[in-house]
Amino acid sequence: MYLCSMKLQTTIEIPQPKRLLGLRNHIAFIGSCFAEKIGQKMRQSGLPALVNPFGVLYNPLSILQMLTQNLMEDALYFADEDGRWHCWLADSSKNASTREACQAGILSARGRLFGWNPDTLIITLGTNRYYERPACPADAAADASPAGAPSLVVGNCHKRPQAEFVERNLSVAEAADALDRICSLFPQSQIILTVSPYRYSKYGFHESRLAKSVLLLAVDEVVRRRPEQASYFPAYEIQLDELRDYRFFDVDMLHPSPQAVDYIWERFADRWLDAETHRFLVDYEPIRKALLHRPDDPESPAAIRFRERTQEQVNAIMEKYHIEP
């Protein structure tokens, strides 16, 4: 009998973590939309996680700006034509009807992150490209700012005219230095660095790969600088080398599909979560499915009883594993 010995899939090796994650860890995700995808998978699995408190941020410098900038500066906030207030450092999820409310939301987001006191910070990077807004936007086209007036690195352009910004690329050294400074803000935390597999077609696919290459080299440099604190999870390689098929991309052929996100989450969980947490995930799975249930009539007696039973199951599993609500 002939036995096939062909290997039909590349399996990405994931290094052994220095510290496994468990039920009582404080885990925070910041960065690109892929951070939200994986962070939400963790939350849906019943695990504690703070996910993108500032909204989506794509590059190391914008993340650093959000963590270190003086948030009381007037230049960080502006109102659009409809009277909605925005913060240049954050995405549109932090918009508000007044300047005070916008600023309060940003201050609260930063307070939540540092108040959460994460022992594990997972940073997902999308690109090395960033946008700089000169102090006088009219000077953007000339790539110059008035003497002595600093430019502002924005986290989101909020659909403002492109002429207001200068587009730049971080070098490997600049990206590594920004990441290193972020790590220094959380000296007691382990830092897990990842690169999003999302492809930026608007830059061109070759340019997108170049941007990812800069990030990968920068991440490698930081892991070398901080071997006891920083490590790398190869989400990018799993998507492109292990799941190398268009069925693992969403309908836009750019984002990972839900199936791919599930697979990458499972690879992460398999390697990074401790034995107790794996037992918890097995016990929590029927609860997770119950929480996703959406009845036709949420206020019907049957739906109310279903929610009550589900809450009882949540309380029971929290007590079993000694997890504080």
Image (cartoon, rainbow, N blue to C red):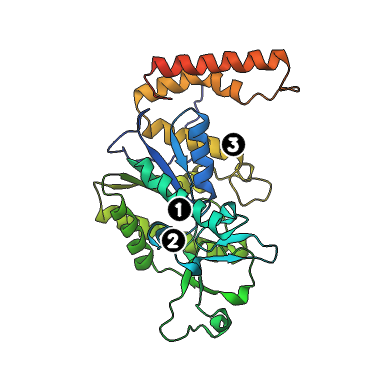
Q: Please identify the quadrant where the C terminus is shown.
A: top left
Which residue bears the numbered disc 1?
Answer: 107
**Looking at the image, is mark 2 or mark 1 earlier in the sequence?**
2
Mark 2: which secondary structure? loop
Q: What is the distance, in whole Å, between disc 1 and disc 3 at their CAs?
A: 36 Å
Which residue bears the numbered disc 2?
Answer: 71
Please report contact status of discs 2 and 1: CB closer than 8 Å, yes or no: yes
Determine whether, in the image, residue 291 is placed left or right of residue 108. right
Mark 3: which secondary structure? helix
Crowding near the residue tagged with mark 3, few <14, some 14–19, many ≥20 C-alpha atoms within 10 Å: few
Q: What is the distance, in whole Å, between disc 2 and disc 3 at their CAs?
A: 39 Å
- Residue, x 40% and y 63% (percent of image)? 70
Residue 72 visible to the viewer:
yes
Q: Position of residue 285 (x, y in %)?
A: 52, 21
Task: Identify the disc placed on residue 259.
Answer: 3
- Residue, x 28% and y 55% (percent of image)? 184
**Looking at the image, is mark 1 or mark 3 earlier in the sequence?**
1
Please report contact status of discs 1 and 3: CB closer than 8 Å, yes or no: no
Of the residues shown, which amino acid type is indicated by label 2?
A: Leu
- Relative to 270, residue 57 above or below: below
Q: What is the distance, in whole Å, between disc 2 and disc 1 at their CAs?
A: 7 Å
